[in-house]
Amino acid sequence: MATQRRRNRDSEAAAVGDEPMSVAISEVAARQRVCICGKVTRMTARPTSGQPALAVSITDDTGSVTAVWTGRRSIGGVTLGRRIAIEGVAGLHGAHLEFTNPNYTLLPRHV
Amino acid sequence: MKVIIAGAGSVGRYMAEQLQESGHHVTLIDNDAGVIASCRQQVSASGVTWFLGDACELTTLSAVGCSDADVVAAVTGDDEDNLVVSLLSKQEFAVPRVLARVNNPKNEWMFNDMWGVDVSVSTPHLLTGLVEEAVTVGSFVRLLSLEGGRARLAEVTLAGSSPAIAKELADVGLPREATVVAVLRDGHVVVPRDDTVLREGDEVLVLVTGGVEDEVRKALVG
């Protein structure tokens, strides 16, 4: 069941979001499926309700945004200064936009 | 407001009708064709949108317009499904407010922001709270958790021995993080003000944030 859901999720993500647009971080809007690239500038362990969570700030030339992955303290390969791309839907948390469990891609170190 | 309800059982249907009557735009999802058909017949004119599908599937949530929903309520009779609906709503659609029903109180610990749940409602837990509230005088009863447990609604029925008796509310010594939201006295609701004087038998409803419950208990129970 779980694998079936995962498979569906992959194939459906495209259908749901109609190919996420790749945008500058300053242009991320709430509740739109987007893809952004940037450098990891901050990593914080942020336990919520007693469960671990990892909050990562991603910055490009236009601004920065936070992505939170729940249930983990670290992600292999995601380190300070690393360039990553994330794809997902950001929601408003107070005044900040935050991605919850977005898909991520590690980008090459030297471009 | 646009509200999506997963699970067209008695809870879901009741909520849908109530919310629709208050003028909200309600969509109800269930994966049982028979249930949906009978709902359509019963309340055909009510304006609730019915959708046949599995609310645990992204395509279903997308089809009912989850991406601009204000509230998603996961109220199926199955805790796993409620958690999946909550997580998907938060993670894939960033729904601002996600409510979930806890069927088995043993699962309540999972219904938090890690699974995308903003507010969880556990009927057994609520009932226990209400029973306690009905039978106990002079103790501190938690009724409801809000904001993922960060705020709690609690009730104290003042016994004769309470240190708060015959004091004005401002002098009771409640911490800043606790607000008296209502005082029930002789079947009436007294809107609390600083100069409201508390009496024996008053039911005091307090909204408590942070870890100040012990101070509240000390001020009201003794």
Image (spheres, coloured by chain):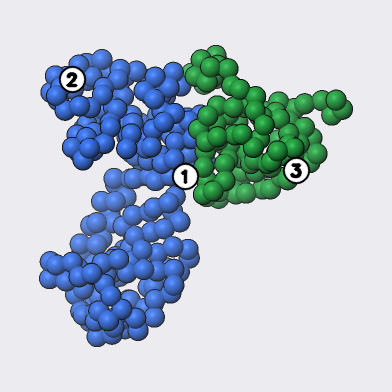
Chain colours: A green, B blue
Q: Residues within 10 Å of mark 1 (few under 14, many from 20)?
A: many
**Residue B175 in the image, given as x and y percentages of width and height:** 43, 74
Check if mark 2 and mark 3 are on a common chain.
Answer: no
Residue at disc 2, secondary structure: helix
For label 3, the residue is A41
- The answer to whether residue B97 is left or right of residue B10 is right
- Separation of marks 2 and 3 at Cα, in angstroms: 53 Å
Nearer the observer: mark 1 or 2; the answer is: 2
Residue B140 visible in rendering: no
Judging from the image, mark 2 belongs to the subunit labelled: B
Residue furthest toward the right? A110
- Separation of marks 1 and 3 at Cα, in angstroms: 28 Å
For label 2, the residue is B40
- The answer to whether residue A97 is left or right of residue B133 is right
Identify the residue at horizontal 23%, vertical 19% (top origin). Answer: B36
Nearer the observer: mark 1 or 3; the answer is: 3
Identify the residue at horizontal 14%, vertical 24% (top origin). Answer: B45
**Residue B2 in the image, given as x and y percentages of width and height:** 33, 34
Q: Residues within 10 Å of mark 3 (few under 14, many from 20)?
A: some
- The answer to whether residue B168 is left or right of residue B211 is left
**Residue A14 in the image, given as x and y percentages of width and height:** 55, 16
Judging from the image, mark 1 belongs to the subunit labelled: B
**Mark closest to the chain's N terminus, 1 or 2:** 2
For label 1, the residue is B112
Which image quadrant for residue B186? bottom left
B39 is higher (above) or lower (below) than B97: above
Q: Amino acid at mark 2?
A: Arg
Residue B145 visible in rendering: yes
- The answer to whether residue B1 is left or right of residue B209 is left
